[in-house]
Image: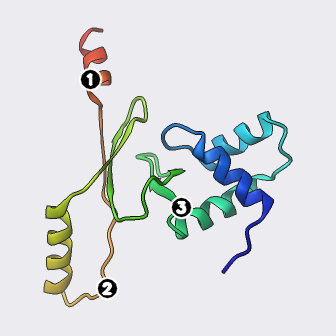
Amino acid sequence: MKRNTWQREAVREALGHTEGFVSAQGLHATLHATGSPIGLATVYRALATLAATGDADSLQSPEGESLYRACSTNDHHHHLICRKCGLTVEIEADSVETWAKNVAAQNGFTQAAHVVDVFGLCAGCTQAAAHV
């Protein structure tokens, strides 16, 4: 078990005050804007630890960048994410859970895990795009 450091607590607090998903670089810039001397490599490590312990959600953007946000639940869940504004909705997907277990078993896999993030445009961004 890793000890809790002031750096990890600073990252946890900053992440908790951030809307939606944010990159390590973005969170680092936010921390520096408030006067924190924390280094970028430390922010990366803290975010990785928070994600590994279930305290943060992590996903890959369509461009391949790791993004993070404070996790509202430690239960397994999936996300709908707006590509334009970043609005994120946590969803349950029972049919995905069943499918993943079945496909894994059919192929001889055990202890299978999965991540499902669905990217699209939220209703607000869809409506705004229709009025352009």
* For discs 1 and 3, the disc positioned in front in the rendered view: 3
Horizontal side, residue 95 vs residue 12: left or right: left
* Element marked by disc 3: loop
Horizontal side, residue 9 vs residue 17: left or right: right
Earlier sequence position, callout 3 versus callout 2? 3
Q: Nearer the viewer, residue 35 or 25?
A: 35
The mark found on residue 33 in the picture is none
Residue designated by label 2: 111
Residue designated by label 3: 55
Residue at 37%, 35% (x, y): give it: 83
Q: For the residues marked 1 and 3, what is the alpha-carbon distance in whole angstroms? A: 31 Å
Find residue 48 and report its image quarter.
bottom right
* Element marked by disc 2: loop
Name the kind of residue labelled 2 in the image.
Gln
Earlier sequence position, callout 1 versus callout 3? 3
User: Mark 3: few, some, or many residues within 10 Å (few <14, many ≥20)?
Assistant: some
Q: Is residue 84 visible?
A: yes
Residue designated by label 1: 126
Residue at 15%, 70% (x, y): give it: 99
Residue at 32%, 69% (x, y): give it: 114
